[in-house]
């Protein structure tokens, strides 16, 4: 490259690296991932970055100011060069063609929307004057020029507490722009002010030369004909792009319409960082709205942002988390990965009005990772917040996915660590499930409100002896209802004087399901439709609990040889009185339940007056949740029939 060509490149504000040929014709896939996460993902990533950059040894809060507004397109640094690149892009599939056309439509605006994230009481990036140095101490070079890399603190304790770890969150800001464009303004400890930026396009041809997809808003120094080094621009640009105090400021021009929502930004802050804010580690100002430890409850309790009806808390749980965290004393929870025990604080609340049970898994930094679903308990009436210490924090950090929104083992490559991670996540569910189960028993014990013995179908002394034996064979006639067959009870023989007691025959192990064979009523042969087998369920395999206007049924078939390999069944009901008399046609399912759904997946089941169809069996267990109608009699007892 001669000096003339070098000078031409240097005169351009945006730098793209030349390549011999175009090999990749798609946009960076991480862009779509963060785009799908919406304003929540954008706010979460930039708030987390601000907290990661907090001043060491400073006891006060990190302050983050989020502003939205409008500026002239001409005030965006180097925008004409970006537009020239966009105009030469060529899509080679339907997705890239659509994305490029969207960009071209947006660059015609003369006034554009933007969002900025400016932090205070933070360190900012270091070593900007050293440019693309490659030194781990120069965080400007890592942030500005390295994709998929994040700076690691020299202090391991500080590094553990940081939210970031995968190095992909920087691209979240690009995803919020209609043209994948973002800038970052920095002021370091010496007061030096610089501006950088990136734009994410696709590999393209510009003036007969092929270029890489990523462009950098940066200056360049040529070391010789083949080597060069990036250096940042000193910041003398439009005030929107200024950063006058120590720290970092992210500016995203051409803000997407779906991200331009102040209410959703405020909710995102409250959802992910309510613990940080309550602990005084973070304050956030969104335009004129200030969220602090004193004002946070005002936002969370405001119906403008959150539905305040506890019975409707099915997707948004922040109001529940806030109440749980503030009102409950934490209890210790130990969870093992098979090698090491981790100890957490669990703030737990049981409330029968809560429709969906979730656990906020929170890092010590105060950032919520996810609304954790406890296996087989997602519809139980509880709410909880889980927080660990330094060791627990480090382990949770290793389990986070790239977007810091879920505990996962999928990204772990080491087979042993992956196995341990799966075990930990499973054990986390199991340990919390024990607490949920204990709370259910405690709140449904004999306390004047509800006696679980009255709502669990069990054999009691008022029933006839050996009730399950008295429920004889049930036959289905063609088109006729269920009828109970008569049972011949053998008479007890008298023993003659001097005659010893006859030895009882050896008892056989009885399956908890009693077979009921279906036959055609006319000729006694099974038809094609009647090849299924019907069983009466032993009372010990059925658990029944009523919670407000819901009833939960659990069928445990794990001890039944007949259902070992079954994945679904039909279930029907019959009323039974205190003397064991069955009334097979007295109870109509449709008259008593408005909906019947799988307890774990929430999928609704079809049902007739007497049969619930295709009930899912998972690992030998079927669990149902029924919405009760007002006419339902909660004191009824039933015998259940299972057909497979």
Image: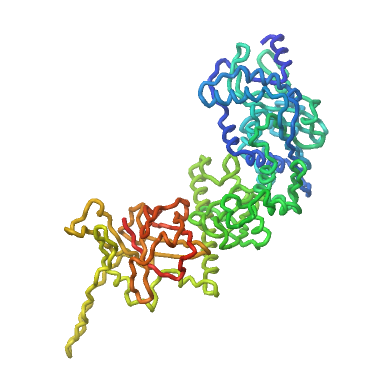
Along the viewing direction, whichever of 288 and 554 lies nearer the viewer: 288
Q: Residue 583's spot in the image, x, y percent?
A: 34, 69
Along the viewing direction, whichever of 626 and 296 lies nearer the viewer: 626
Residue lying at 33% horizontally and 77% vertically, measured from the top left: 465
Residue 153 visible? The answer is no
Quadrant in the picture for the N terminus: top right
Which color scheme is applied?
Answer: rainbow
Along the viewing direction, whichever of 313 and 28 lies nearer the viewer: 313
Residue lying at 78% horizontally and 49% vertically, measured from the top left: 59
Along the viewing direction, whichever of 336 and 173 lies nearer the viewer: 173
Q: How many marks?
A: 0
Quadrant in the picture for the C terminus: bottom left
376 on left or right of 505: right
Residue lying at 49% horizontally and 54% vertically, measured from the top left: 375
- Image height check: is 52 above or below 130? below
Q: Residue 486's spot in the image, x, y percent?
A: 24, 71
- Image height check: is 83 above or below 71? above
Residue 35 visible? The answer is yes
Q: Residue 342's spot in the image, x, y percent?
A: 58, 55
Within the image, what quadrant is residue 145 found in?
Answer: top right
Q: Residue 397's spot in the image, x, y percent?
A: 61, 45
């Amino acid at each position: 490259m001669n000096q003339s060509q070098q000078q031409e490149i240097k005169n351009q504000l945006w730098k793209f690296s030349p390549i011999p040929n175009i090999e990749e014709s798609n946009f960076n896939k991480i862009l779509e991932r963060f785009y799908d996460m919406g304003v929540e993902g954008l706010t979460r990533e930039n708030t987390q970055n601000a907290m990661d950059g907090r001043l060491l040894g400073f006891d006060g809060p990190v302050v983050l100011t989020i502003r939205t507004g409008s500026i002239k397109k001409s005030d965006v640094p180097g925008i004409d060069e970006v537009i020239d690149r966009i105009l030469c892009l060529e899509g080679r599939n339907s997705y890239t063609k659509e994305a490029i056309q969207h960009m071209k439509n947006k660059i015609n605006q003369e006034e554009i929307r933007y969002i900025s994230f400016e932090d205070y009481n933070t360190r900012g990036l270091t070593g900007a004057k050293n440019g693309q140095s490659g030194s781990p101490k120069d965080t400007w070079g890592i942030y500005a020029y390295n994709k998929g890399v994040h700076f690691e603190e020299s202090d391991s304790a500080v590094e553990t507490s940081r939210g970031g770890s995968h190095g992909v969150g920087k691209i979240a800001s690009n995803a919020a722009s209609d043209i994948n464009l973002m800038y970052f303004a920095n002021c370091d400890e010496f007061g030096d002010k610089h501006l950088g930026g990136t734009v994410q396009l696709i590999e393209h041809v510009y003036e007969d030369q092929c270029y890489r997809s990523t462009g950098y808003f940066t200056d360049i120094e040529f070391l010789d004909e083949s080597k060069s080094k990036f250096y940042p621009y000193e910041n003398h640009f439009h005030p929107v792009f200024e950063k006058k105090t120590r720290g970092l400021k992210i500016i995203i021009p051409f803000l997407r319409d779906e991200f331009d929502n102040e209410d959703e930004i405020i909710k995102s802050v409250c959802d992910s960082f309510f613990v940080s804010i309550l602990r005084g580690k973070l304050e956030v100002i969104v335009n004129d709205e200030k969220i602090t430890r004193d004002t946070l409850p005002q936002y969370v309790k405001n119906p403008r942002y959150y539905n305040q009806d506890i019975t409707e808390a099915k997707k948004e749980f922040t109001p529940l988390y806030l109440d749980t965290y503030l009102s409950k004393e934490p209890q210790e929870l130990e969870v093992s990965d098979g090698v090491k025990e981790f100890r957490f604080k669990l703030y737990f609340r049981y409330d029968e009005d809560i429709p969906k049970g979730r656990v906020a898994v929170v890092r010590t930094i105060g950032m919520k990772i996810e609304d954790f679903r406890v296996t087989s308990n997602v519809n139980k009436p509880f709410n909880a917040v889980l927080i660990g210490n330094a060791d627990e924090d480090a382990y949770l950090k290793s389990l986070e996915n790239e977007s810091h929104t879920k505990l996962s083992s999928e990204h772990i490559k080491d087979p042993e660590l992956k196995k341990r991670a799966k075990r930990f996540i499973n054990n986390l569910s199991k340990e919390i499930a024990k607490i949920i189960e204990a709370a259910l028993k405690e709140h449904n014990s004999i306390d004047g409100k509800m006696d679980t013995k009255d709502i669990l179908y069990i054999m009691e002394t008022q029933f006839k002896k050996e009730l399950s034996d008295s429920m004889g064979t049930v036959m289905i006639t063609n088109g006729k209802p269920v009828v109970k067959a008569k049972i011949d009870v053998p008479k007890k023989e008298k023993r003659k004087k001097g005659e010893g007691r006859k030895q009882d025959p050896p008892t056989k192990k009885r399956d908890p399901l009693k077979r009921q064979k279906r036959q055609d009523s006319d000729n006694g042969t099974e038809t094609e439709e009647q090849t299924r087998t019907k069983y009466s369920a032993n009372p010990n395999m059925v658990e029944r609990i009523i919670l407000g206007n819901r009833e939960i049924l659990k069928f445990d078939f794990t001890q039944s040889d007949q259902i070992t390999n079954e994945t679904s069944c039909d279930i029907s009901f019959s009323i039974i009185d205190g003397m064991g008399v069955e009334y097979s046609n007295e109870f109509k399912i449709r008259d008593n339940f408005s909906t019947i759904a799988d307890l774990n997946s929430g999928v609704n089941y079809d049902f007739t007056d007497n049969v619930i169809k295709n009930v899912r069996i998972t690992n030998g267990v079927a669990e149902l949740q029924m919405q009760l109608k007002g006419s339902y009699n909660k004191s009824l007892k039933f015998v259940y029939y299972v057909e497979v």
